[in-house]
Amino acid sequence: MGTRDTLTTRGTGESNERTGGTGRRALLGAAMLAAGGTALGLSGTARAAGAGQGGGRGLKSLPVPTIIGHRGASGYRPEHTLGAYQLALDMGADIVEAGDLVPTKDGHLVCRHEPEIGGTTDVADHPEFAGRRTTKTLDGASVTGWFTEDFTLAELKRLRAVERIPANRPHNTLYNGRWEIPTFEEVLRWQDEQTRKRGKQVWIYPELKHPTYFRKLGLGLEERVAKVLRKHGKDDRNAPVILQSFEPTSIERLNTLVDNPLVVLLSSANSRPWDFVESGDPRTVADLITRKGLREIASYAQGIGPTLDLVIPRDASGRLTEPTTLVRDAHRAGLILHPYTLRNENPFLPADFRKGTEPDAYGDVFGAYRAYFATGIDGVFTDHPDTGLLAREDFVND
């Protein structure tokens, strides 16, 4: 998730050895003991939310607040790899965001954070692809690198994934080169395999990336996604596949093609979805989160995925202020809210929850979870599912 979710800044925080090293290992160890489907805190959450019992179907079967592994367990493994997805499940994540979907030159759907893959693969180490490096305009921004639409699937399969933000996650570089780029079909097969092995339904939450951009290239995403879902029998309203996009018209298009749960992603209040820019629609995200805007979204989607700052804004110093009315207003419109993204490291946390000066040290993320859960959100995307599950356990049993 998160076209605009590319922060790589070096923030503030104490070193891992002083504040987070032992704690991080302890949390990870505790979560791994929960492998095999016994999510940390699930029983408490199920009691609190009235979910997860009796074999319910669809969105209502999920515990609340739902813990969503953002691009897998990307706090511990290079994102959008089967390794990251698998670890998220082993930690007990309720849903795995398996797939930021982008197309190849020959029309296959693959899982990458962006179509530009210079920062998430070892493509720069392949001299045979040096000539593919180019500059393109992506949603109005000039981007230089290598793009999935210039490679066949067979060519992309020669690459290996690497850590996207090594300054913040140096430990993840240990796994550079271990996993290839997965296709959407491989993810769906993996989902079925894990569901059988675990004896409980595994959920995924793919995002369609830059739909307008790809449609102009003749590589429309919505029809391709719908075709693959139909092939695998996962295109109905109770299917364990939630689809999301930052472009509302893409979600509207999907609503005519599949019956899956649909979610509109929302960036900063003053931003405009790119499909609106292309069509001349003057509305911003601020317009979409009015009561009128939310009712319109509810006519074709089941939820929204706002940036956390739309739920609780930050002041000029980066500290949390008072919650907005977004949660209340969205719920009144019949929409669920799954904001993004909580991460353990200091640079990604509100200033009031940071500790020390090191960019890869952990801050008081449990305090941040408490603040966001208290607003009534239905779930949250997190790079560290184990931490999210412990935070949920604290919250529902407090």
Image: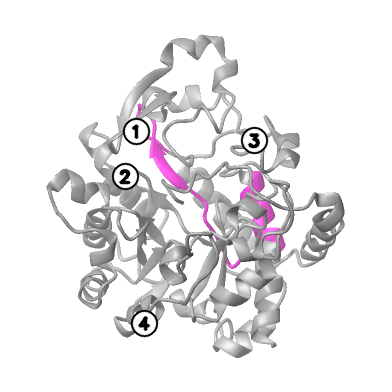
Q: Quadrant of the C terminus?
A: bottom right
Residue that mark 3 sits on: 179
Q: Is residue 71 visible?
A: yes
Q: Which residue is under mark 2?
A: 224
- Report the amino acid beneath label 2: Arg
How far apart in space, not on screen, are marks 3 and 1 (Cα)? 22 Å
The residue depicted at 44 percent of the width and 53 percent of the height is 206
The magenta stretch is: 83-109
The residue shown at (37%, 67%) is: 304
Q: Residues within 10 Å of mark 4 (few under 14, many from 20)?
A: some
Q: CA distance from mark 2 to mark 4?
A: 31 Å
Q: How far separated are the C-alphas under marks 2 and 1?
A: 8 Å
The answer to which of marks 2 and 1 sits earlier in the sequence is: 1
Mark 2 and mark 4 residues within 8 Å of each other at the beta carbon: no
The circle on residue 107 is 1
Q: Which mark is residue 246?
A: none
Does residue 92 appear in this view? Answer: no
At mark 2, the secondary structure is: helix
| Residue at the disc numbered 4 | 331
Examine the rendered structure and indicate whether residue 166 appears above or below residue 388: above
Q: Earlier in the sequence, mark 2 or mark 3?
A: 3
Instruction: Give the Cα distance between marks 4 and 3.
Output: 40 Å
Q: Residue furthest left?
A: 280
Question: Which amino acid lies under the numbered mark 3 shown in the image of this protein?
Answer: Trp
Q: Is residue 361 left or right of residue 251?
A: right
Q: Position of residue 313 (x, y in %)?
A: 45, 67
